[in-house]
Image (spheres, rainbow, N blue to C red):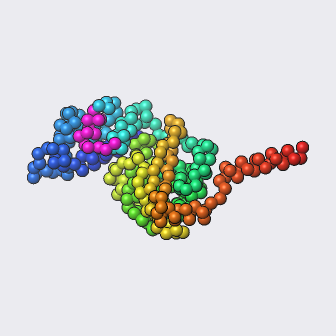
Amino acid sequence: MDNRDDIRDFLATRRARLTPADVGLPTSACRRVPGLRREEVAVLAGISTEWYTKLEKGHIAGVSEDVLGAVADALHLDEDERTYLLDLARAAKPAHRQPARRREVPLAPRVQWMLDSITMSAAFVRNGRLDVIGSNALGRALHAPMFNSPTTIGGVANFARYHFLDESSKDFFVEWESGAAATVALLRAEAGRAPYDKALRELIGELSTASEEFSAFWAAHDIRIRHEGTKRLQHPEVGEIELTYQSVDLPTGKRAWHDLSFYTAEPGTTNEERLKLLASWNAHPAPSAVAHDRGRNAQGQRGEVT
């Protein structure tokens, strides 16, 4: 097992989207391929055509970061795409070619306490496969259609499964297509970080088999690492609501990857009013706080007896 197909297709799609005019090369009427030719990329990167052709065939293990950087410059890769290319090169090294599952790291109690303490933002933690492994009450309420979907397995919701295997997601996400594209791009980034993760490959295989829309987005080889922007939802309880979202990485260890996402509304807007309304309808003591209070009460009762 190797990741040469991913490397080949990624470089080929990035080359195909550029024209000679985009990179300052002369144009001609007779071009047999869309985008740049391999020899043109090689010239721009300062390497031989033979060497670039070898790279595009997936033989990337051991290539220096300087060369990869030159290729990234030639192909006008953005920051996320550069990171993905480096991840592919790292994973191509023989020492990394070991089919393995990403280590399943449970959500640390202190992280759940933090989630529970957040009351005016919907917050949740995802792993690289887009499983929701932790959430606060407002996060669950905001994404109730996903959590209640048949695509939620064993109580674990997954953004990708919900997007592509539940038709109701097209009603919930107002701008479904752009959200679906971002979802696939996030999975592509995870595939670069962990191309031999069995659970990830199984998820991608499941979605590719069941959804033509997923397959089309996957073939585009778009990459997204930073998760931020604006999202509009058609919520069954409060109606349409527009929120901004931002994610930050959580340190979990060498073979696990989690990120923390916040969904917030602009102050003074109808969206904030609707988010507050949703929060008030779904307010309840955090599980960790309830357990803490029960412990204190139990200690007090023991003290009274003695």
At 73% across and 50% down in the image, what residue appears? 293
Visible residue check, residue 35: yes
Q: Which of 87 and 21 is in front in this view?
A: 21
47 in relation to 295, above or below: above
At 75% across and 50% down in the image, what residue appears? 294
At 51% across and 44% down in the image, what residue appears? 258
Residue 203 lies, in percent from the top left, at 47, 52
Looking at the rendering, in which quadrant would you find the C terminus? top right
Residue farthest along the left direction in this orientation: 29
Choose top left, top right, bottom left or bottom right for residue 107.
Answer: top right
Magenta segment boundaries in residue numbering: 67-79
Looking at the rendering, in which quadrant would you find the N terminus? top left
Q: Nearer the viewer, residue 245 or 97?
A: 245
Residue farthest along the front direction in this orientation: 268
Residue 102 lies, in percent from the top left, at 51, 42
Residue 114 lies, in percent from the top left, at 59, 47
Visible residue check, residue 234: no
Magenta-drawn stretch contains 75: yes
Residue 305 lies, in percent from the top left, at 89, 47
170 in relation to 90, above or below: below
Q: Residue 71 vs residue 26: left or right?
A: right
Report the magenta stretch's main SS. helix
